Amino acid sequence: MSTLNRTTLFPALAALLIPAAIGMVFFYAPLERTMGSVQKIFYFHLPLAFSAFLSFTVACIAGIMYLRKRQRIWDARLAASIEIGVVFTTLVLITGSLWGKPIWNTYWTWDPRLTTSLILWFIFASCLILRSAIDEEGKRATFSAVMAIIGFIDVPIVFLSARLWRSIHPTVIRTDSIGLESSMIVTLLVSMTAMLIFWVGLYKFRVALHLQEAKVNDLQTDGIR
Amino acid sequence: MMKETYLVIAYMAVWIGLSLYVATLAQRQRKLAQRIDLLNKQLKSEED
Amino acid sequence: MSSLRQVRFLLGKDLRIELRKKESLVSMAFFGTLILVMLNIANGIGRQVDAETGAGILWVAIIFSSVLGLGRVFAREKENGCVAALLLSPVTAGEIYLAKTLVNFTLMLLAELVLVPVFYVLFGAQLNAAPLTLLPILLLVNLGFSTTGTLVSAISAGTRRNEVLLPILLFPLILPLTALAVKATSGALAAKPLTALLDQLEPMAAFCVVFTAAGYLLFPFAIRED
């Protein structure tokens, strides 16, 4: 098992599980009655959304831990989770509107969940811009930690107010009313697991990359004269 | 447009997006490896 | 008690500087009026607006002009190296935060004293003049904007791109507040009573409470220069 050490375990598992999940989506899961084949977007839309939200939760925790401990590892976790979260949320928004177009006949509607994902995307993308604007490591970590925490605090308020600021709710087909068959649930569980394992692999890789870059920077600034 | 088109575009967007991100990270990793090599060489030439 | 005195002292200091130089207030009122005029032209000359559009126009003008004042609150201290002096003095970071929030709240309120009448002059022909129902909405947004904005402007002032970063960081955070304010204002402009707007005013108040607490706790990290 020397080749399958801790760094390659998750990517290897993801490489096995993701094709399996895609295969199940197209060949195993049945067609949904009202929505037809478009509903199959759901099997990767939901895991992506879940992983994106997981990233922002990790970002908030890493931000709090950094402010308390001031250790580089927490900044690495913060940077990794913000970046992965923005990538995943972008994909959630794209798949969401591609699902919405044939079903609701519009790419975009101010449904609370759509609104929340969009505002989350804006907040954490602005965090990335902030990180790119600061060169000093400590300051960059502190500032983006503060923004990640306050951005995460904003989430419940956004969700609550998105339900209030529109008087007429569009008749949105809700995922909880679809009435999933058991084979659909199995497919969803497999793709959810695949996506989470992929997320963990990506996250570990990104954290390690950040730490290595920081160490090389240290060496270049004060190691070699 | 056919409903299947949306499905295909969505899946392509997801996997192209994710692989682009992985490729970006790999590129950063490669650049880092180059920098480490360069530093190694500098260190060796200083020792000699 | 002494904490309150220090906040009042810092607030007095900033307001006195503002009164002597009038740099923030004049540009806020001027820029806001400019936006209102531009939107009036963009709307089509001589065309009336309904309550919902009017509410949106009013808030675009207020929010965009307020960012100007907010950017100056810390930039002024940074330019003269006063933040270090403030931190050395026997005031806590929390007191600085409260004082700066109140400064910004006051500036916004004064700018609105100009902008709201200008708004009614330009757009008010079909709208209900309801200053008393508008007042709580204005106060709540000022409070929410100032508490969030003071924290964010301390962050953006610590970077080299203050003016660019401030709206980029701040607007996503206050988006829920703005959306609720627009909804409530359109109700007020359509002559709804205040009790009918409680559905929007209550979450706005919750936003203010949450962000005051978060800002007070996080501000010490944002202001320290290390």
Image (cartoon, rainbow, N blue to C red):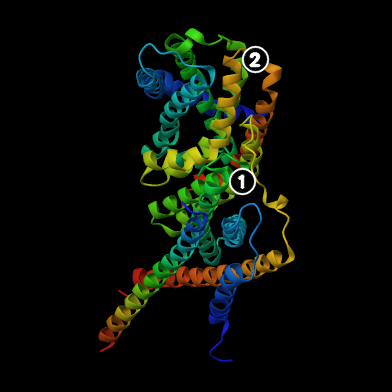
- The answer to whether C157 is drawn above or below residue B19 in the figure is above
The quarter holding residue C142 reads top right
Establish if A159 lies above or below C116. below
In this rendering, is residue A160 above or below A38? Answer: above
Residue C8 seen from this side: no
At mark 2, the secondary structure is loop
Q: Chain under label 2?
A: C
Q: Position of residue C51 (x, y in %)?
A: 53, 17
Percent position of residue C175, x then y = 54, 36
Estimate the x, y position of residue A78 in percent, counting from the top left: 54, 60
Whether residue C159 is visible to the viewer of this picture, yes or no, is yes
C1 sits to left or right of A51: right
State the quadrant of the C terminus of chain A: bottom left
- Residue flagged by tag 1: what amino acid is it? Arg
Q: Is residue C3 above or below residue A21?
A: above
Q: Amino acid at mark 2?
A: Lys
* A27 horizontally vs A86: left or right: right
Q: In whole angstroms, how far apart are the C-alphas of marks 1 and 2?
A: 29 Å
The quadrant where residue A201 appears: bottom right
Task: Identify the residue at horizontal 51%, vertical 17% (top origin).
Answer: C50
Residue named by callout 2: C192
Along the viewing direction, whichever of A12 and A19 lies nearer the viewer: A19
Q: Position of residue A87 (x, y in %)?
A: 48, 58
Looking at the figure, which quarter contains the N terminus of chain A? bottom right
For label 1, the SS is: helix
Q: Which residue is mark 1?
A: A113
Front residue of C67/C223: it is C67
**Chain letter of disc 1?**
A
